[in-house]
Amino acid sequence: MASSDAMTLVTPEDDSLHDNDGHPYWNESSWVPFHVADRGLSGMVYFYHRPNMRFTKGGVIVWDRSGENTYDSRHYDFDIHPFDANDMYDFTLPNSLTVKCLNPLTSYSFAYDRDDCVLDLSWNGVMKPQQTGLPQGAKEWADKGHYQQGGRATGLLVLDGERIGIDCLTVRDHSWGKRVLRQMNDPRGDLLWAMAAPDHGVCVYVAADQDEDRVDHKREVIDTTGVGWYLREGETRPVTSIKRRALRGVDGRVTELTVDGHDDRERSFHAHGTPVNLLKWQAYNAIMSWYSLMQFDLDGHTAMGETTDYWPINKASRMLRSM
């Protein structure tokens, strides 16, 4: 695995459910995306536990260029189930999603079989997990902990009877803390990543703190300190500056994305990309996300990645009316 000595320490215990203060909105979530680049196909296992409310919401989502909405995606199963987890990565939901941690902070398996969609996925880390914290103003997502980790996803997806092999570099995350996404003035943001090789990638989390009414959303710029990590030649360092520039279509989608920045050792990075597909998704009722698989040029190398480009729903509405 690639090395790092500058991030907040992530321990094997952080792959378990954490002790909490009993707050009803205590939340532990995990996002595990995968893709098949030459088909323009994306998928993810996403779930979050609300142990004090006694439910888990989770499932499998698959989409490609043929549909942009949850109702016309290739497969959409993301629902609420009774909380019955043995641990964060040790449970089976009634919809058949089975999640296992094989080696903490390193290896996981994900299995699913429902409604003409079968998934058998292995995930193995190519670097140590990085707990970089959250950008200013984004504490409503996880006020106790949040890490991301680059890895490789391999396995088999069977979709409507067609067998599709999976072998891709990707990034997963795990967040924990109170998650109350009902504040309409919360900033919008983007958790985006690009991986060119097991020893070369970047993951940044930005939050927009500017006056939205003064932003030209067709050609917007977010200049922020942000948080994240940069991996090059096997060394992972924290990101200390980020500038994100996006062009948008009339329906709000990102049509072009550029990210520049540097890490704490003044190593600079440059990523420029265009979307391969799009999913208009509401993982939470108060949030709208334009979620795309991206093809990037990262420091002169081809890299696949994603933008999650999320907005509080009222800000999304105002942005769309201004386009």
Image: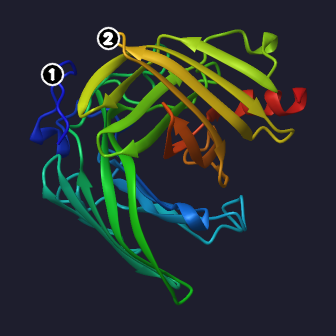
Report the front residue among 217 and 84: 217
Q: Which residue is mark 2?
A: 264
Could you tell me if residue 31 is visible in this image? Answer: no
Q: Is residue 128 above or below residue 209?
A: below
Residue sitting at x 31%, y 23%: 132
Q: Amino acid at mark 2?
A: Asp
Residue 105 image point, x, y percent: 17, 46
Q: Is residue 122 left or right of residue 25?
A: left
Q: Amino acid at mark 1?
A: Asp
Give the image quarter of residue 259: top right
Residue that lies at the very extreme toward the bottom in this rendered image: 161
SS of the residue at dot 1?
A: loop
Residue sitting at x 66%, y 61%: 70
Residue 309 image point, x, y percent: 61, 36
Quarter holding the C terminus is top right
Q: CA distance from mark 1 to mark 2?
A: 12 Å
Residue 288 image point, x, y percent: 65, 41
Q: Is residue 151 left or right of residue 167?
A: left
Q: Which residue is mark 1?
A: 5
SS of the residue at dot 2?
A: loop
